[in-house]
Image (cartoon, helix red, strand yellow):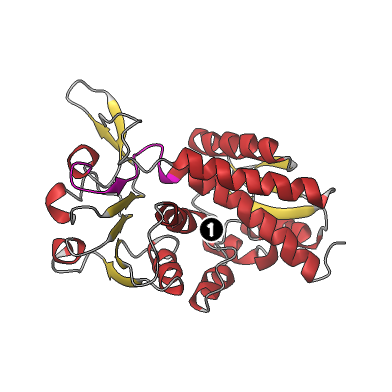
């Protein structure tokens, strides 16, 4: 991606990330003693370690204890659940993060369901996702919430905003669509059976894309002045053999049309990490309200 970071059309994640982490840090300072976040990695997967390091740095920045646990790749499903249930019952555990991917013999959805909703800082428990339908978005899935936060940062009024969500996954597309509807936006969700994505995207004030197809969205698919939020992360090999990270949007082309566009990397990713810690703050509030902690 050949873009200048000072381009005003770029909707950068860093300022939004810093604002959210500053709010969390202030909350942690007021709260005094606060429980730890537990990061669970099953097996030593190098790609996971990048995410864990980013989370650990953010935890240090806001003053939250961060416990990195590396479980054996041979651990059984039942043993994983037993350990998670112990953490659910431990008042010193504020929240639980289950890093993905996990070994093939582990059912990740089952483990996500085992994490108590009040400790589900990733917003991945089915109950957490289901709450969004009832406009309870306090602990929503982090990537979906990050996309909504970036749209909000443009200053556009959410009510009546015409949004097209390209991608309908359970952890990004569907939650983001429901969160935006809760804000008063009119949302159309496109997927692999949609006859013409361009027909929908060209009329949208906001286009969000999360499908995992490099440069799926081109300049001819975006209305002039629209907000484009690119959640895709794809590895592509250039002619010289170099591996580049690109999104689902052809950024160089679309930024000539869009009013705002998130770069990849540097857009949604930094905000996603910050949302994790905002969810942790809200988990603490709800645990206090439930009488779990003093």
On screen, 291 above or below 260? below
- Residue designated by label 1: 108
- Farthest residue toward the bottom? 134
Residue drawn 67% across the image and 54% down it = 280
Q: Position of residue 202 (x, y in %)?
A: 17, 61
Q: On the rendered image, what quadrant is the N terminus found in?
A: top left
Left or right: 15, with 59 as reference point: left
Residue 86 makes an appearance in the image: yes
Going 21% across and 27% down the picture, which residue do you hit? 238
284 w.r.t. 218: above or below: below
Residue at 70%, 58% in the rendered image: 84
Q: Nearer the viewer, residue 5 or 294?
A: 5
Assess whether residue 47 is covered by the magenta stretch.
Answer: no
On screen, 128 above or below 212?
A: below
Q: Position of residue 20 (x, y in %)?
A: 58, 48
Q: Which residues are magenta?
A: 255-268
Secondary element at image label 1: helix
Q: Main secondary structure of the magenta part?
A: loop
Count of numbered tags: 1
The spot of residue 218 in percent (x, y) is: 16, 48
Question: Residue 263 occupies which quadrant of the picture?
Answer: top left
Foreground pick, 130 / 227: 227
Residue 119 placement: quadrant = bottom right
What x and y, as percent, mark residue 55? 60, 40
Q: Is residue 48 left or right of residue 261?
A: right
């Amino acid at each position: 991606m050949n873009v200048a970071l000072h381009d005003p059309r770029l909707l950068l994640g860093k300022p939004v990330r810093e604002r959210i982490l500053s709010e969390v840090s202030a909350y942690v300072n007021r709260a005094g003693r606060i429980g730890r976040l537990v990061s669970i990695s099953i097996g030593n997967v190098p790609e996971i370690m990048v995410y864990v390091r980013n989370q650990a740095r953010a935890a240090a920045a806001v003053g939250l204890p961060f416990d990195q646990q590396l479980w054996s790749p041979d651990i059984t499903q039942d043993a994983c659940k037993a350990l998670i249930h112990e953490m659910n019952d431990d008042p010193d555990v504020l929240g639980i993060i289950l890093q993905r991917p996990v070994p093939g013999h582990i059912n990740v959805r089952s483990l996500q369901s085992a994490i108590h909703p009040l400790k589900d800082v990733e917003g991945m428990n089915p109950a957490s996702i289901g709450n969004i339908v009832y406009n309870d978005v306090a602990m929503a899935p982090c990537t979906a919430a990050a996309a909504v936060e970036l749209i909000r940062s443009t200053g556009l009024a959410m009510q009546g905003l015409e949004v097209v969500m390209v991608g309908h996954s359970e952890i990004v597309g569907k939650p983001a669509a429901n969160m935006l509807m809760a804000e008063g936006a009119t949302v159309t969700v496109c997927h692999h059976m949609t006859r013409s994505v361009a027909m929908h995207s060209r009329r949208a004030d906001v286009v969000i894309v999360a499908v995992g197809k490099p440069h799926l969205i081109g300049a001819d698919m975006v209305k002039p002045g629209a907000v484009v939020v690119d959640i895709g992360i794809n590895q592509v090999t250039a002619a010289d053999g170099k591996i580049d990270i690109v999104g689902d949007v052809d950024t160089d082309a679309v930024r000539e049309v869009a009013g705002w566009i998130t770069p990849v990397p540097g857009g949604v990713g930094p905000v996603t990490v910050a949302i994790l810690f905002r969810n942790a703050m809200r988990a603490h509030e709800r645990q206090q309200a439930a009488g779990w902690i003093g």
